[in-house]
Amino acid sequence: MLNTKDILETIEMIRTDHLDIRTITMGISLLDCACESGNTFATRIYEKITKKAENLVKTGEEIEKKYGVPIINKRISVTPISLAGGNLGYDDYILAAKALDKAASNTGVNFIGGYSALVQKGSTPAEDALIESIPEALACTNAVCSSVNVATTKSGINMDAVAKMGHIIKKAALLTANNDSFGCAKLVVFANAPDDNPFMAGAFHGVGEGECIINVGVSGPGVVRSAIAKEPDANFAQLAEIIKKTAFKITRVGQLVAREASSMLGIPFGIVDLSLAPTPAIGDSVARILEEMGLECCGAYGTTAALALLNDAVKKGGVMASSQVGGLSGAFIPVSEDEGMINAVNKGALTLEKLEAMTAVCSVGLDMIAVPGDTEADVISAMIADEISIGVVNYKTTAVRVIPAFGKKVGDTISYGGLWGEAPVMEINKYSPSKFIGRGGRIPAPIQSLKN
């Protein structure tokens, strides 16, 4: 039961601390759209998406007006296209990408995810064709997002796929060079990708999901930072309690929106993702939360410990608020989308190596990181391999969204605007991993995978 104090507190969170619902994401199964004809497949997926999601944006806007809670994005995720497409080829998948983009435009959503392949243990010819088509698909569309799952704890790491993704990312950078290689910002390489993630660019509708589902991703770094700032002398146990209570309140708002959208659309409510998703707005930053805990600058020694405390407390508070928690659920640290992270990189306090260490205790991984445009494909593959290994060994989701910005060098900046933000081009290790990446095959699953 909400009381007057709760209502006023929520209003204050929205007004001054950037509380919002980052996304309502509708997951749609496309398995019944399979067809041997690329044109027919494209037509089927367009018709199904536009029918299922015709009222999604309108419903989101009505909820915003009813409760006064900003809903920043309305999105769609679909069955990984390499699965729904069956035995289609390169040109057929490009037709599918264009159909997805047209459906996104027709329904008014911000993004559509699921131009994806799951190749953690190997790949079929159809999955190979889809992966090869990713750079062109991202270059010729606006709203389409793509992901490739190259590893799981149970299967190990498909290093052939990892090696290939370095080249795919480089090609995507080249084909979108006129926009700071923006295609790479819409492409994620995963380990242990979740089936119910509402966040882009990695969202897809997993094969274990139902026909259609509503998933919600909350936000709220600014709310957490503000709560900590009010208790400057709190010890670590008290700090954890503050974060837990704040995460509880944020999640309650997310669940309210999710259930309302589910009821209005007549579609089952799936999960609330608890992830603290930052924005480029001043104060709405995970880095600033860590600094509010007592670090002079994000990246200083102690940053990983502070992030571990934050991530754990957020999950504990969120789980108490909702029994339907899923997705990624934790703290995101995307460089371009977090003004505090950008500031820390520009100061020299935050490096790629420190970011990699931080990903061992938070959601996702090396996210929205710009590197020099002349970075070799094998170096990108090795960055992916390092990050994916953290996920596989620790039984968690990790991912890489790296942008080798065409024509850019260390010290330059890429800029996309909106939630995508801007990022300084970061320095990378210059030593070659080519022989390692060239070995091929699969890194076996770790011993902790044997849990049956």
Image: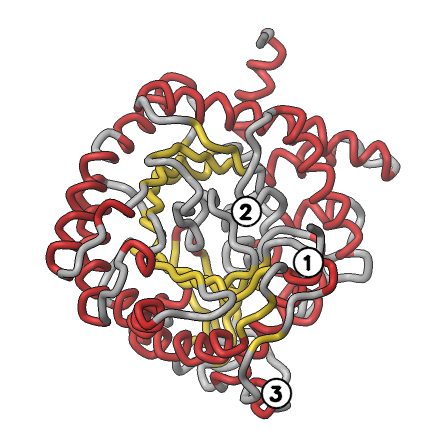
Q: Could you tell whether 121 is left or right of 5 in the image?
A: left
The residues tagged by marks 2 and 1 sit, at their Cα atoms, a distance apart of 32 Å
- Mark 3 — residue? 436
Eye-nearest disc, 2 or 1: 1
Q: Could you tell whether 296 is left or right of 97 in the image?
A: right
Q: Residue at x 35, y 73 (%)?
A: 128
Q: Which residue is drawn at 39% across and 51% down?
A: 418
Whether residue 205 can be seen here: yes
Amino acid carrying label 3: it is Phe
Q: Which disc is residue 278 wearing?
A: 2
Residue 442, image x, y percentages = 57, 76
- Mark 1 — residue? 449
What secondary structure is marked by label 3?
helix
Asked if the residues shown at circle 3 and circle 1 are in contact, with their CB atoms under 8 angstroms apart, the answer is: no
Eye-nearest disc, 3 or 2: 3
Q: Which residue is drawn at 24% across and 61% down?
A: 141
35 versus 331 height, above or below: below
Q: Which sits earlier in the primary sequence, circle 3 or circle 2?
A: 2
Observer-nearest of 239 and 222: 239
The residues tagged by marks 3 and 1 sit, at their Cα atoms, a distance apart of 24 Å
Q: Which sits earlier in the primary sequence, circle 2 or circle 1?
A: 2
What secondary structure is marked by label 2?
loop
